[in-house]
Image: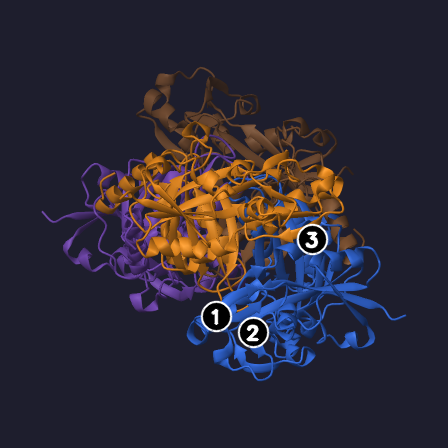
Chain colours: A blue, B orange, C purple, D brown
Amino acid sequence: MPASYAYLGPEGTFTEVALRTLPETATRQLIPYVSVQSALDAVRGGEAEAAFVPIENSVEGGITTTLDELVAGEPLMIYREVLLSITFALLVRPGTALSDIKTVSAHPAAQPQVRNWLKANLPEAVWESAASNADAARLVQEGRYDAAFAGEFAASRYGLAALETGIHDAENAQTRFVLVGRPARPAAPTGADKTSIVLWQRDDHPGGLRDLLGEFATRGINLMVLQSRPTGAGIGNYCFCIDAEGHITDRRVADALMGLKRICRDVRFLGSYPRANVTAADVPAPLTGTSDSAFVAAADWVARCQDGRF
Amino acid sequence: MPASYAYLGPEGTFTEVALRTLPETATRQLIPYVSVQSALDAVRGGEAEAAFVPIENSVEGGITTTLDELVAGEPLMIYREVLLSITFALLVRPGTALSDIKTVSAHPAAQPQVRNWLKANLPEAVWESAASNADAARLVQEGRYDAAFAGEFAASRYGLAALETGIHDAENAQTRFVLVGRPARPAAPTGADKTSIVLWQRDDHPGGLRDLLGEFATRGINLMVLQSRPTGAGIGNYCFCIDAEGHITDRRVADALMGLKRICRDVRFLGSYPRANVTAADVPAPLTGTSDSAFVAAADWVARCQDGRF
Amino acid sequence: MPASYAYLGPEGTFTEVALRTLPETATRQLIPYVSVQSALDAVRGGEAEAAFVPIENSVEGGITTTLDELVAGEPLMIYREVLLSITFALLVRPGTALSDIKTVSAHPAAQPQVRNWLKANLPEAVWESAASNADAARLVQEGRYDAAFAGEFAASRYGLAALETGIHDAENAQTRFVLVGRPARPAAPTGADKTSIVLWQRDDHPGGLRDLLGEFATRGINLMVLQSRPTGAGIGNYCFCIDAEGHITDRRVADALMGLKRICRDVRFLGSYPRANVTAADVPAPLTGTSDSAFVAAADWVARCQDGRF
Amino acid sequence: MPASYAYLGPEGTFTEVALRTLPETATRQLIPYVSVQSALDAVRGGEAEAAFVPIENSVEGGITTTLDELVAGEPLMIYREVLLSITFALLVRPGTALSDIKTVSAHPAAQPQVRNWLKANLPEAVWESAASNADAARLVQEGRYDAAFAGEFAASRYGLAALETGIHDAENAQTRFVLVGRPARPAAPTGADKTSIVLWQRDDHPGGLRDLLGEFATRGINLMVLQSRPTGAGIGNYCFCIDAEGHITDRRVADALMGLKRICRDVRFLGSYPRANVTAADVPAPLTGTSDSAFVAAADWVARCQDGRF
C-alpha cells in the first residue's frame, strides 16, 4: 500500500494543483479531506504520511485555520512549501454566453480576486458562495448556477467550458501551501531554506517584541513572515508565527532560536524546509560574522579563553 | 433628521448589542448594512456619520475585511472601540427539547466557540452555516433549522426560547468593535487612550521590523496589537496594523509617529481614541523620561543650547 | 586693545603652531598660560575671549585635564577644532653631533613617540622629563641637557639646530586641539560639523549605555569619540564625553539630543563646530529618513494627523 | 626561591599597601619596579609570577599606561583586583609646624586630591612634583622639601611625622589595582566575578558601538567599565576596554563573548576574576532567561528540534 498524502479537498482545486507539483506525489496516494483540520488530524492519527494545506494567500493573508492548528494543535512540522499563482477561469456549461449568466459562484476567498472583473463584465450577476471553487463548478455542471470561478484545470473535470481565463484583480495573487507531517528530523539544508516557529512572549512590556525580533536582527537573519494570532486568553493576548530565512542547522539560526527559547515563555518549532521558487544561488551570503564558520571560530576562541590558551 | 450610524447587520447580532453600549446611540438612527464594506462605504459616501464594525475577535483574530478596508480603502478614522464578551445561547422554537434538535445553525465564526459544547451535548446534530447568527435565528423561527447559536438577546426578537445560555468554549471570548468615521480631529485624550496606525516598511532587511518597533520601545510605549496584512504585492509583502498605547497628542506618541514616518515607506494614521474598559486610573504613568513634561523640558533645553543660553 | 586668545604655553610648542593655523589669530593677542586650567579660567574670568588647548592625542588618548574641565568645570563651549600631525625634531646646540648626546629631554608625552628612535639611535642616552617640549629646548639652549625632542619650529626660537627631523614612532600621530569660549550661539553649520556632549546615565542597568547610543544610531548619526570619565563619585561611576557627527541645528542631531536629555540624568552641551580637515563634500548624505527635510515632513504629517487633515 | 610578584614601586606607596592586602603576598617576594611597563615586562620575561599595578583611579580615570600595555602589549591576563580608598597624610620631619611649611611635594596624581586642602590650609606653599609619593617623603626626610603628601603608612618608613591625616578632596577617592600574569586558565567563578576584554570594531557605522554593547544587554549583563583607547592608527580610531559582570565560564558571558568575537574585528580576553569588595551574596540573580540553566535548556531544546524530537 503506497503512503498517502492528505490534502484539503475537494479534487480539482488549486490545492490539488499545487500538491501535484511535488515530484513524490507520483508515488503517493492523494486523499482529499473536507477541512484543514481533518487533513491534519489524518496525519496526527497516522492515516496519512503528510497533509498538504494552504497557509497563506497574498490577497487575504494567513489561513487562520491552518495557522491555529500548527500553533495550538498536537505538534506537527512543515517539510515543504509550494507557491502557486492564482488566476481564475470563468467556467460555464458549454454553449453558455456571457449574456446568459445571471448567477456566479465560487469560494468566498475568490471574491476579492474577481470583484473588479465582475463589476466590469457582469455587473448584474448575483454572487452565490460555494464551499470550494470545485464545488461551485460542480453546481454549475448540475445547472444550479450559471457560472463558476475556478482554476482552468477544473473545466475538463466537470465538463465545463472556460469562457474567460486569467482573471485576477490583484497582480501577483499567490497562495502558499505547506506539506505538514509528524515531527521528525528536518531535511538537510539546501542553502535556500526557511525556518518556521511560534513565539509566546514571557510578559508584555515596552520593547518586548522588539527584543524578540532582535534575536534575528543581531544575527543578520531576515524575517519573511510575522503573523500574530490570538492565544485564546482574550483580546490583547497574541502569539507570533514567524518564518525566518535559514535552516535550524545553520549556526546563526540555531543561535537565534536558543536566544528566543531563553527569553520567551514558549517557542514551538514548526520546521526548516526549502523555500519555494528560490535556489541557493539566489540567497545572498550571510553578513560578515554570521556565517557558520564565524560561529565555529567564535566558539573555539571562547573555549580557548576559558582554558587560558590564546 | 437625526444623524445615523451604519453597522454590520442584520439586527439582533452581537454587533448591534455592542453598538448600543455607546450612549450617543440613543439619539442616532442605527442602520444595519449587509457587509463591513457597505457600512464603511456609507460613511465614505456621507450617508452615515459613522460605521460600527467588528475588528478583532479573541478566538479567530483580526477581522480581515475590516482591517483591509482601513488599510487600503479611502481613509477613515477610528473614534471609539467597544469590547464585548461573547457567549452564546442555544435558541429554539418554544417547546423544542434538546433531544429534538437535529440541525443547528450559526455564522461560521461561532463554530469554534461552541464546538466542544456541541460535541458534549449534541454530538449528532448537523451544522448548517448561516450568514449571521441573527439569520440563523430567523431560519429557526421559520422552521428551517431546529436550533441557532446566537446572543441571548436575539431570542425575543425572533420569538425563540433560550434552551441554554452562556455557551463558550474559550474563556475570555471577546469581540472588539470600532466606530469609524471620516478623518477629523481626534477626541481629546482621556488618559487611557490608544492610537492605531498602519506601517509599510521602506525596504526589507534584517532588523527592519525591529527598528520600527524600536520607535515605540525607546519611548516606553506598549504595543497592544501588531497584525500583519498582505499589501497585495504578492506573498512576502506585508504591512503592519499596530495599536499602541497613548494618544497622538501625547508627546511620546507624536514623537514615535514622527520617527516612524521618517523611516517607513508610508504610515497611515487610523485614529487616537479611548481604550475600552480601561480608565485613566488603570494606566501606569509613563516611564521616566517619556512624560509630556520630559519632552517639553528636553525640547526647551535643545532650543536653549542652539541659542547658546544654558 | 585686541581680543586675546589664551593657550596652553609655553610659546614654541605644538599647541602654538596649531593655534596659528586659525586665520583669526592674525588679529588676536595670543597669551600662553601655564596650564589648561589656567587658560580656561582666563576665559571664564573674561580675561580672554577664548582658550586653545589640546583635548586628545592619537597616541596617549584623551587629555584628561581638558576633558574634566569641560565636563565638570563652569560651563564652556567648543567653537573650533584643529588637528595637527606630530613629528619631532632632535634639537641640539649648533655643533653637537649625535655621538655627543648623553642626555635628551622632552615632555613625557613625547616619550612614546620617540622611544623606538631613541633605542635605535641613542640607546645610551638618559631621558630627562621637562615641563614642555619648548622648555626642554630652553634647557638645551642653557646647556643643561644635550638634546631636546620638540617641533622643528622651536629650533630658531631657541637658537638650536635640528640634527634630525620627522621623528615619530607611530604613523598618524596627531593631536587634536579645541578653541573654547564662553557659552554662546554656535556658529552656523558648514555641512561638515560635529557636536560634543557629556552624558550622565540616570541609573545603571544592563543595556543602559546601549540605549543612550541608540539615540544616535536610530537617527543614522555616527559617533566620532566616546570617552568615559570618572564622575568623582568613586570607582564605577562614569560620565561619557561623546563627539557625534552633525550640528545641533541639524534636525536629526537636535532630535537625538532631545532623546538623550529625556533619558539621561544630565546632558551637557559642549558645542557644535566645524570638523577639522573635513569639508561638506567629504560628508556622506544622511541615511534615508534622517535628513532635515524628512524631519520637517514627519513633523508636518503628525501635526496634520493631530488635526484630522491628511 | 619563593615566587615573586612585581609591583609598581617604589616601596611605601599605595600600590604596595594594596598589594599586601592579598593573602598570598605573605609567601611571595615583592619586588618594586620603576614603571608599569617594566613590572609587566618582568612577568612576560618570566622573572616574576605576576605584576601588581594600578589600572584606574576614581579621580583621574583609567591609568593609560596599564591599559595600553594590556591592550597592545604581549598578551597578559588579570587574575585579581584590589580596590583601595585613598586618603593622604601630610608628612613632615618631626618638629615641623604647619606654619613652617613653604614647599610641599607629591606625585602629580595626588594634586587633584589635596588641592582644596592646600588652598584652605597652606595657600602660600609651593608645589614640587615628585616621581612618587614615597619619593616625596624621602625628599622631605632629606630636607629638600618641607612636607609630602603620602599614605600615612609611609611616615614610619621615612622617619617622618603625620601632621594631618585623612586628606582627600573627593569623597570616595579610590584606586583600583590589578594582579596580572601570563595567560592561563582563569580561577573558578566565585559568583561575584568580572570579565575584562578589549574590542576592536570591524568598521565604523552608525550603531556599530551600540550593536557591540547589545551583545551584553540582550543577555542581561551589566557593564562596569567602558574605556576607549586610541589604536595608534590616528585620531578617530579607538578600541574599547570593557569590564562586564560575570565569569567567562558563565554561559551568558561566554555567549556574549562569542557574539562579540563574530562581529568585531578583534577581541582580546583579559581575564575573569573575583570582584573586589563584592561577594556572591551581593550579586543579583541573572534576569530571567539568562541563567546558566536557561542556556543549557535552550541549547538542549534546539538540539532536539534539529533532531525532530520535541
Q: Quadrant of residue D292?
A: top right
Which of D237/A178 is in front? Answer: A178
Q: Mark 1 belongs to which amino acid?
A: Ala
Q: Mark 3 belongs to which amino acid?
A: Glu
One can see residue B175 in this view:
yes
Question: Mark 1 belongs to which subunit?
Answer: A
Label 1: element kind: loop
Estimate how packed mark 3 is, as few (under 14), some (14 to 19) or many (20 or more) residues with alpha carbons within 10 Å. some
How far across and down, in percent of the image, does residue B206 sit? 54, 61
Q: Is residue D241 above or below residue B274?
A: below
How far across and down, in percent of the image, does residue C143 sit? 36, 52
Sequence-wise first label, 1 or 3: 3
Marks 2/3: CA–CA distance: 36 Å
Q: Is residue D48 above or below residue A174?
A: above
Estimate how packed mark 2 is, as few (under 14), some (14 to 19) or many (20 or more) residues with alpha carbons within 10 Å. many
Sequence-wise first label, 1 or 2: 1
Residue A125, numbered label? 1
Side (left or right) of D292 relative to C165: right
One can see residue D239 in this view:
no
Question: Mark 2 belongs to which subunit?
Answer: A
Q: Quadrant of residue B121?
A: top right
Question: Mark 3 belongs to which subunit?
Answer: A
How far across and down, in percent of the image, does residue C268 sit? 34, 40
Whether tag 1 and tag 2 are in contact, CB under 8 A, the answer is yes
**Residue position for label 2:** A146
**Residue position for label 3:** A69
